[in-house]
């Protein structure tokens, strides 16, 4: 990247956040801090109102806006591909917002770039998995993002598990993450006085209140996940051994059942899963027959035995009725 392109990119980066540290700029462009200082000085000499705070970082003075930026062909292609993923892996609220943004991006492309995107449009697709899995996410992801950022208490009308029983909850939304082919909301439940995992596609009604809540003493989503596991709430861990000849068939499907990690053993692969639905993962594992061995937990082993006995009884009855 030449210096002129880098100066433009640094200016865009400065406008992307309230405060940008010099080290962030250095890391992004793989340059020294001295070069960062020199580039920022050049932007200031060119009339860009950049302020700084010792030990904090740089910021653009309020009121200054960069004129419309042209996108490169690679950047436009990346956005189009991202749109395909957004369409499949989010809900209507996010899809609509992204589609509007993509139209704005297309409006500033030149004719050659527009033709390039049109030629790609029908040649890139994200295919739904063949198995019937919970891929829907309701229509609240945009509202949930706003509530998380604004630290606003939300009121949920929530459908429990696969049951028809519903519950009303006031929760403090912490974060969103995607696993087992569904979006999940991690939140502090004021009713249960603890962290809870809510599947977004089971939220039937949502109201964002004006009540604000203070940040809690856990800083990352992974720590929230660990807290849920320790509390034995909804999300549960499972350890499964696959024979190597069977393992090659699960590579693509395992991510829909909460796959976390794998470990190579002699003749086997140990895979770790995190799921809120043992019924779903048990029925999936059943299809691999003797090529699978459940290490833990005992609850999943018991469930597998019940499924096998149920299947055996079913076919014994069919045979005896002939």
Image (tube, helix red, strand yellow):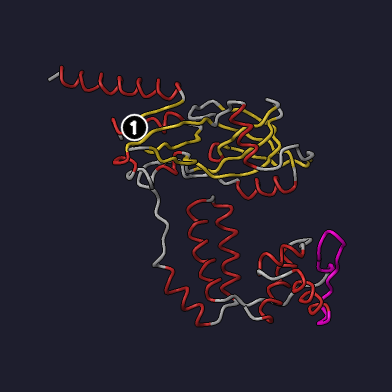
Residue under label 1, please give it. 292
In the rendered view, would you say 20 is above or below 129? below
Q: Residue furthest right?
A: 54
In the rendered view, would you say 209 is above or below 24? above
The foreground one among 66 and 55 is 55
The foreground one among 114 and 48 is 48
Q: Quadrant of the N terminus?
A: bottom right
Residue bounds of the magenta highlight: 45-62
Identify the residue at image location x=68%, y=76%.
6
Q: Residue furthest front?
A: 266
Q: Secondary structure at mark 1?
A: strand
For the image, the number of numbered tags is 1
Q: Position of residue 144 (x, y in %)?
A: 65, 45
Left or right of 63 in this view: 309: left
Q: Residue furthest left?
A: 322
- Does the magenta portion include 60? yes
Identify the residue at image location x=83%, y=81%.
45
Left or right of 269 in this view: 234: right
Identify the image quadrant of residue 205.
top right
Q: Position of residue 248 (x, y in %)?
A: 33, 45
Identify the residue at image location x=52%, y=73%.
74
Identify the residue at image location x=39%, y=30%.
282
In the rendered view, would you say 88 is above or below 259? below
Identify the image quadrant of residue 28.
bottom right
């Amino acid at each position: 990247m030449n210096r002129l392109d880098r100066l433009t990119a640094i200016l865009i980066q400065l406008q992307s956040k309230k405060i940008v540290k010099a080290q962030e700029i250095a890391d992004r462009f793989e340059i020294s801090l001295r070069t960062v200082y020199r580039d920022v000085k050049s932007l200031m000499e060119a009339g860009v109102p950049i302020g700084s705070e010792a030990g904090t970082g740089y910021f653009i003075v309020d009121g200054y806006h960069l004129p419309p930026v042209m996108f490169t062909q690679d950047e436009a292609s990346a956005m189009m591909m991202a749109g395909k993923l957004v369409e499949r892996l989010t809900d209507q609220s996010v899809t609509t917002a992204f589609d509007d943004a993509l139209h704005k991006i297309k409006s500033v492309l030149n004719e050659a770039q527009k033709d390039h995107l049109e030629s790609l449009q029908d040649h890139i697709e994200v295919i739904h998995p063949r198995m019937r899995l919970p891929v829907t996410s309701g229509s609240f992801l945009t509202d949930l993002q706003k509530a998380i950022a604004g630290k606003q208490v939300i009121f949920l009308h929530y459908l429990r598990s696969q049951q028809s029983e519903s519950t009303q909850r006031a929760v403090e939304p912490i974060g969103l993450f995607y696993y087992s082919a569904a979006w999940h909301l991690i939140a502090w439940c004021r009713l249960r006085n603890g962290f809870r995992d809510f599947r977004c596609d089971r939220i039937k009604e949502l109201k964002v209140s004006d009540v604000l809540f203070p940040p809690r003493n856990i800083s990352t989503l992974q720590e929230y996940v660990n807290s849920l596991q320790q509390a034995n709430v909804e999300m549960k861990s499972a350890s499964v051994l696959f024979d190597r000849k069977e393992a090659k068939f699960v590579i693509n499907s395992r991510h829909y059942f909460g796959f976390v990690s794998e470990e190579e053993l002699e003749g086997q692969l140990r895979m770790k899963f995190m799921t809120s639905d043992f019924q779903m993962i048990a029925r999936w594992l059943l299809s691999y027959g003797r090529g699978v061995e459940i290490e833990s937990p005992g609850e999943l082993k018991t469930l597998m035995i019940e499924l096998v006995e149920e299947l055996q009884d079913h076919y014994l009855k069919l045979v005896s009725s002939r």
